[in-house]
Image: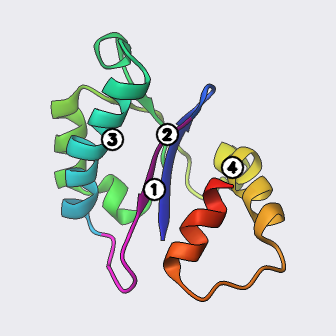
Amino acid sequence: MLKIFWDSQGVILEHYLERGTTVNSVGYSEMLSTELKLAIRTKRRGLLSSGVLLLHDNARPHTAIHTLQTLEKLGFTVLEHPAYSPDLAPSDYHIFGPLKDALRGRRFTSDEGVKEAVHE
């Protein structure tokens, strides 16, 4: 599974989960606190101090108390995402649509092959 964080300037972080890994609040919060925070600091200098706006869906790991506490501690502002609003998912149009087009019809023998193709 691929979790991707991006803004108008491009991709900030690609986070791949190992096959069979379950997404939960603890793992998601840890990734936000370590990997995403570092990626923002590295790729978008000054953004952490000026304020991060985060739009994610209403999946349970995103709305769990542990995650909300982590987001508050990080100082991230979470934009409201109404339930059942797929038309408000910019990733579907700007990231995953083109990615599906680029990967359509290809066969992969390993997870590493998929990761490499994503970077092409």
In magenta, the rendered stretch is: 11-23
> Pointer 4: residues within 10 angstroms few (<14), some, or many (20+)?
some
Label 1 vs label 3, nearer the camera: 3
Label 2 vs label 1, nearer the camera: 2
Q: Label 2 is placed on what type of residue?
A: Leu
* Among the two numbered marks 4 and 3 on one chain, the one whose residue lies closer to the N terminus: 3
Residue pointed to by mark 4: 95
Position in image of residue 21 (x %, y %):
32, 80
> Pointer 2: residues within 10 angstroms few (<14), some, or many (20+)?
some
Identify the residue at horizontal 69%, vertical 49% (top origin): 95
Residue pointed to by mark 1: 58
Q: Label 3 is placed on what type of residue?
A: Leu
Q: Quadrant of the C terminus?
A: bottom right
- Whether residues under marks 1 and 3 lie with C-beta atoms below 8 angstroms apart, the answer is no
In the displayed structure, does residue 20 sit left or right of residue 26?
A: right
Q: CA distance from mark 4 to mark 2?
A: 14 Å
Q: Label 4 is placed on what type of residue?
A: Ile
In the structure shown, which secondary structural element does the residue marked by tag 3 occupy? helix
Q: CA distance from mark 4 to mark 3?
A: 18 Å
Identify the residue at horizontal 35%, vertical 10% (top origin): 50
Q: Nearer the viewer, residue 10 or 77?
A: 10
- Whether residues under marks 2 and 1 lie with C-beta atoms below 8 angstroms apart, the answer is no
- Whether residues under marks 1 and 4 lie with C-beta atoms below 8 angstroms apart, the answer is no
| Position above or below: 15 against 6 | below
Q: CA distance from mark 1 to mark 3?
A: 19 Å
> Pointer 3: residues within 10 angstroms few (<14), some, or many (20+)?
some
* Among the two numbered marks 3 and 2 on one chain, the one whose residue lies closer to the N terminus: 3
Residue pointed to by mark 2: 55
